[in-house]
Image: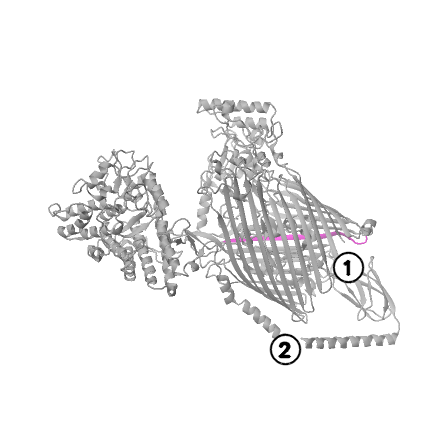
Amino acid sequence: MSNIYKILKRSWNKGVLLLLLLTFCTTILFAQTAVIRGTVKDESGEPMVGAVVMQVGTKNAAPVTKDGTFELKNVTPGATLQVNFLGYKTAVTALKSGQTTVSFVLKSNTIGLKEVTVNTGLYKRPIGNFTGSAKTYTGAELKSVNPRNVIQALSVIDPSVRIAADNISGSDPNKLPNLQIRGANNLTLTTNTSAANPVSNGDIMASYLANPNQPLIIMDGFETTLQTLYDMDVNLIENITVLKDAAATVAYGSKAANGVIVVDTKQPVQGKLRASYGINANIELPDLTSYNLMDAASLLEAQRLSGVYNDPSNYFNDVAKQQWYNYRLAQVKSGVNTYWLSQPLQMGYGLTHSLQLSGGGSNLRYSFSLGYGNNEGVMKGSGRDRYSMGYNVSYSGKKIRVSNATSLAYVKGNNTPWGSFASYSKQLPFFRNNDEAGNPIKILEPNGSELGFGSQAPGGIFVNPEYNSTLNVKDYSTMLSLTNNSSIEWSLLDELKLTGSLGWSANTPQSEAFLPADHTSFADNIGLMGDLGSYQQTKGNNNVINGKVSLNYRLTFGKSTLLTAVGGQLQKTSSNGTTIKVLGIPNDYLGEIGLANGFSYSTLKPNTLSNLSKSVSNFASISYNFDNRYTAEVTANLSGSSQFGAHAGMTPFYAGGLSWNISNEKFFKPNDIIQSAKLRASIGTAGNQNISSDIQIYQYSLTNNYRLMLGSTTGSYANPDLQFQKTLKTNLGLSLGLLKGKINASLEVYQETTDNLILPLDIAPSTGFLSYRDNLGGTQNTGYEIGINANVIKDAKRNIFWTLGFNTGHYRNILTRLSPAIDAINAKNNATTDPNNPLNGRYQTNPLPRFVVGQSMSKIWAVPSLGIDPATGQEVFVKLDGSRTFVWDANDKRPIADATAKFKGSASSNFNYKNFVLNFNLMYQYGGYMYNQTLVDKVENVDLLHGNADMRVLTERWKQPGDHSSFKSLVANGLNGLQQTNATSRFVQKDNFIDLSSLTVGYNFPSTLKWVKASHLSAPKIMITQNNLVRLGTIKNERGTGYPFARSFSFGLSTNF
Amino acid sequence: MQIVRKKILLAITGLSILFSTVSCQKWVDDTPNPSGVDESKVFSKEQGFRDALNGVYLQMGSPALYGKDLTMGVLSLMGRSYDSVNVKKISNLQYQAAKFNLQDQDVKVYSASVWNQMYQSIANVNNVLANVETKKDIFTGNNYNTYKGEALALRAYLHFDILRLFAPAPSTGSLASPAIPYVTSINFSATPVSSVEQVLNQCIADLNTANDLLDANDLTQSQINKWAVQGLLARIYMYKGDNVKASEYALAVINSNKFSLSNNKNDLMFNKESLFQLYVYLNDFSQYYKSLFSDPSLLGLSTSGQTALYVTGNGSATDYRKNFIAGGATTSLTIALQKLSNPAGGVTKSNVFPMIRLTEMYYIAAECATDGTTGLSYINPVRIARNLPALTSTQVPNLAVLSTEILNEYKKEFIGEGQMFFYYKRKNTPFTALPFYPAIAASPKAGEVPVASNATYTFVKPE
């Protein structure tokens, strides 16, 4: 080792000697020096403030001043001058004799400063040597879009990152988003309804099983959960890279099919101890603009019209129901008209503090961070508290760099004790919510016998969900997580680096839900006292151990650069969670699980979910670059996982990419329009292992024994040949730099084909099993993404900058192959009764999915409708043979429209004027369709007996022959106000919208201010961000049925010390 | 430079060893599943094989199979054991089954569940058999032979009953007609359907192997033993119509003297006569029993029916088996099938079903006899043991009368065991000749059960 250094040193010494000698000679020969003046500008003529001009071979250097000029003294005539500036190519000029002025024009490195290298999480690669499709965003960029939710911010600025709209959970702070990159590669065979405590799981496997299309998330080199990213302090993020195509992701092998999100946290910076502190206060305001519910008088009238208050078949009931009508009418006349919607809502306040300390010398560096956040939701009592602490220590020796980072986080998500928002939007407005003293009334109406009526109230007992807020209800989830990552980098040679890292993380999720006996959910339960009140507790723990080793080699010869990375990774995840539910807690102050009466007799038993999986992933990647013009990249991965069949073994994945930097070609003449152009293409496979494991399992009989001996049986067939799902990804990309850096544009076209989708298949029961899983299906996503960034104003002199960004994307999904078992699923979705719940009479009221080869998974299937017959008020349907009918038949369903938009993307504007900052981001969608479920449910699928509905029930439905209405008539069909409309094309509506998703105003205090100086602050700034401020859309639907949507407004202040 | 090279070499070799495919694969494969017990763990010890076979016995005790409907439930209704069948009180499945209306939707659903569960048990047996071979080294003593023999015998037992339910009887000349798949491996591709004769031959082949493997001195009744295997062979040959072989195996069991006839009424189940009996978990058994014999179903045999069965003709009121049934003086009273419950009162203890009995061996031997005297010599020991006088050759002058007496003995002996259905099916008995067939088909009287116009002995296969 030392030999090579000696040689190098010797040659270097020789060079220096020679140079010194030369300088000496020239000095003697001319014996005089000159002052050289000049300018340094970039291609667009902007002054390059901060660049350094130096005389080659000397220490003589001068900075470029504000106006782009420099003055270098003591320059030897005939010397060579060079200008260095990060992000630009070094410019070199040899002085002619007598020359005293020089003007330099610096050429951009074609890529921006922040994109010098791409970090795939497994290896870093200079952008010139990278052929994949990747986008990197800095933490600051994300923060300016949304300071509180990184995932939301990412979906706003990257067109390929999408969050599925969730109209039920709205802006619930405890609901994790459903994230996808470039569309779904899996069938959603079961819809995951949110449980009481959805965000209690920090388990990697479990979160993938819940959303098999979720991308892989890597934080500082290790896999992590969506929840960790969701709860992360944005101030800790250095940057986030989104890896999209095969060339970028294949090193992750079997986990890469859904794309990868790589998060890099801030590393300690050398220097004096620096502290930075940020505070963010925010306000959430519920958005109720899309609700238009009936008032007390209108609802009563609608109920009367739909036959709630008469019974033609039974005279006695008819009289009793009339009495109830009169009673309720009297209430309305007395002025009762409760606006239920506002009852559970509040203005949610939140406060986030974030403190980072960092410093150290050239060897030992350290950083420490503390964070606290408290975000209230718009429903009273709901919120999310986050506490975090972390440190990072690193030591850099001559050849070895060691670092260790630990983070500790605690999250507590409180669910509202007020219940679902839907229970308020449904509530009948002719009930008083509070008594005279202002206390919530538990049972909203006296019963029939109290009033002397012959029957119980139409609709039964109505309870007030508000009442529960007065009780000691518990409904929260917590998670404590501890992560420790260590890594060692060892430079064997300058060009050869060995990296080893070990990561360990442990999470302990817990959730508690306590409903005391007095809770309204037990109000109509006349069961035993011993069963009233319930307590449910889930406790778990999960661990991930992850070890990685990799070897990086870099070789430069002539015009060629060769980069090689080889590595391997072992990962073991284990999780375990137990849920216990007990019944019978009479008093609401006995909110402890151990104080309950017991389990119910037969139905409740403890439930433990356990998972253990191991995976191995080895990769090798080679990238070759010639003359900064041509790049070829090949990456291979060999993956194995315990989740797959015994015969699946180690599965290989390959990807290759090519790129061509056209602007570096000789034939590419410098011109005013195009300055840089780079073409990329890649193809490769990536796997998806987001499924549960398939092993022949024996279940021991818990309750029965055979002659006091244990018995054990196996009930499902584990397919030993089950293979990784593989997705073939192709990507074509073009990046352009136009108009002297004023405009940067990029275009990506991609196709993702999955051929061996894992699907269930029904088999002959004589095999002993009813179904098994095999690689039977196929999907294909084809799409494009366009991004344009324009520097409209770049005036450093006056400190005015304005950049505009625009991006758009589209993808099309097609099912290419399906198993025959899908027919059974389709048949179930066409059945008249719900196969899972025969009592659910409203099974067909939403468009159930149908999976057909050649169609998209997001197609909306409904029966074509010709509208409402003006003569009868009934809906006219078109059968498959084209004939018309009044009768709805599930078999007449046709693909009406696709829910996937034609264009979807965002536009942004960043404007800096002196110290002021004004940013905004718009999201838009065009050409998508949606089944307006909330409209049909609130206007036609109404249950007027039990709940309120939209005003249009009364005003816009068909009433008499000749009415041209888009809503069918109310029917008094003896079903007591229950109206039903099954999936029809009438409610398939265009879903175009523009959403002002963020608006940020900020001010950077100049460091020259007196108070800034006096308080030793540096770079203090304030930022005010508003999220989801305005939404213009073609569909007016009631958004947020279980939890309302919110507009948020946040105020941030940050500074360094 | 040398040292550097060495270091690099070392690093690369280390890496390649660490991530060599072989070691990785091993590490990945060695992942136990925590939510159930992985197959490889179950069969890593001898006990696991016993657990897996017990699992099959437990599955056989499920209500759709021998726990209820293939014994005292559906098959006893079809075997016409009960005369208190009231369409308003029993389920549609039970009533349609009693009418032999096997095309009825409820009966079809039931057939499918029998088919699925029987084959699921067979898959479990096949998995035991597959593992018995691969784990041959771990067995001690005679265990390899025991587990393999028992599993093979169970496979034949289950297939034979599927055949008897879902394929036409050989007595209808159906030996060559397609029957059911005989599944011998655990696999997701369906085994092709074999003919009736092929299935019978495969059952016989499995049983012959089992017969060779099992120990003649192991008389554990709760598991299939060597004598149950021979009894089953007698039953299969009888069904097939091979009287010589049937008689041979029946006599082998009788003459082995390993089992003897019971001669008192202390134990109405005559437990010691069972060659193989299935235990059903007691709590479940009580529930199944009550669902049939308690309110509202109230199945059973009325007092007059009891007299007709046990006393009339060559019977006697002293027949121990008359105690099989208690109550039934009025229709509202529960008729307790005491055979299945403890005579001391209530439904306790006797949570067991005979799967194959010594008496059946005597009846098979009698049925295969070529002359009346020989036949009587096999019936009379059973009659004497049941406290009945021996039949004389004047009472039974010819084989036709002998055959009637055998039928009567079957009816008395196997009430509530489900075997009568198989007897009628084997004999291809005309539906009009069944007990409780309405005297006037159009207007059945109380206690009579009509027969559907499309009546058949063959259940509908779900595939």
Give the residue at mark 2.
B2
Quarter in which the N terminus of chain B is drawn: bottom right
Q: Residue at x 25, y 48 (%)?
A: B270
Q: Position of residue B27 (x, y in %)?
A: 50, 63
Would you say residue A863 is visible in this rendering? Answer: yes
Residue A21 falls within the magenta-colored stretch? no
Q: Nearer the viewer, residue A660 or A655?
A: A655
Q: Amino acid at mark 1?
A: Asp
Q: Quadrant of residue A930?
A: top right
**Left-right relation of B266 to A504:** left
What's the CA distance linking mark 1 and mark 2? 48 Å
- Tell me, for residue A42, which label it has, or none: 1
- Mark 1 or mark 2, whichever is nearer to me: 2
Q: At which x and y percent is residue B173?
A: 23, 51
Q: Secondary structure at mark 2?
A: helix
The image quarter containing residue B123 is bottom left
Residue B14 point in image, percent of width and height? 57, 70
Closest to the observer, B159 or B331: B331
Could you tell whether A143 is left or right of A655 in the image?
Answer: right
Helix, strand or loop at disc 1?
Answer: strand
Query: Most prominent secondary structure in the magenta stretch?
Result: strand
Q: Residues within 10 Å of mark 2 (few under 14, many from 20)?
A: few
Report the amino acid beneath label 2: Gln
Residue A138 in view in this figure? no
Is residue A796 on the magenta stretch?
A: yes
Which contiguous range is marked in magenta?
A778-797
Which of the chains bears the disc numbered 1?
A: A
Nearest the eye: A412 or A882: A412
Q: Nearer the viewer, residue A929 or B126?
A: B126
Residue A12 vertical position relative to residue A40 in the rendered view, above or below: below
